[in-house]
Amino acid sequence: MKLKLYLTPSIFVGYFEKIKLPAFEALFDSLNKGEYFGFYSLLTLYELKALPSPLKEDVFNLISKTKLYECEYDLEDVTQLVNAYLEEKILPPEMEFSFCHIAIATVSEMDVFVSVDTTYSANQFLYQKFKKVNQKLGYGKTPEMRMPEEITGLLGPYENLKFIYEIRKKEYAERRAKDISLLEYLRNLHKQQRD
């Protein structure tokens, strides 16, 4: 059975690092060959739309040429998981959007959460914390957290991740300033992506 891979924004921006990284090219080739099922979320699209040009256009061109599927998930389930992650203090509250991606991958029953963010990818200690929370809330499966290199067996460095971190910090600050719930904020973002 083919694995379902949840691709975080870091995977799309990582493809365009100044130093060409063979792991990314191999990952996208394997998706187009149908070796894996690649998934993204509306939250991923939202974050990618905030990238600077020409990186944004390059990323959306890559998405349009790649065999990908949109995840299906319930935002209430996602925010319930995010709140549980926050209560457990797995990572600082500023990582809220990172938690959202992990929760989306969990609720969508993905096999693997693919990211180049080494904060949680390839970090078995954090994986066990997420797994514990997920099981406590009735999720039998927690997606494995892997980097592209672990899937393809190829290595390389990263530079474009700074854009994703900046976007996530901005969104966290904006939501806090508006004093609205994470659920309402995510609903608004998802509505924007559908329109």
Image (spheres, rainbow, N blue to C red):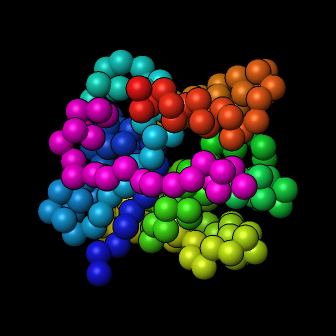
The count of marks equals: 0
Confirm whether the magenta stretch covers residue 69: yes
- Residue ranking furthest to the top: 53
- Residue ranking furthest to the left: 33
| Image location (x, y in percent) of residue 69 | 31, 53
Viewer-closest of 135 and 50: 135
Residue 169 seen in this snapshot: no
Question: Where 170 sits versus 153, above or below?
Answer: above
Viewer-closest of 165 and 171: 171
Residue 150 lies in quadrant? bottom left
**Residue placed at 68% from the left, 34% from the top?**
184
Is 141 positioned to the left or the right of 116 in the image? right
| Image location (x, y in percent) of residue 59 | 31, 34
**Residue placed at 29% from the left, 25% from the top?**
57
Is 3 positioned to the left or the right of 125 in the image? left
| Image location (x, y in percent) of residue 77 | 65, 56
**Residue placed at 68% from the left, 75% from the top?**
138
Give the quadrant of the C terminus.
top left
Give the quadrant of the N terminus.
bottom left
Is 111 positioned to the left or the right of 88 in the image? left
Magenta stretch bounds: 59-80
**Residue placed at 64% from the left, 69% from the top?**
127
Is 8 positioned to the left or the right of 189 in the image? left
Residue 16 seen in this snapshot: yes
| Image location (x, y in percent) of residue 115 | 48, 54
Question: Where 159 sits versus 36, above or below?
Answer: above
Question: Where 80 sits versus 181, above or below?
Answer: below
Viewer-closest of 85 and 18: 85
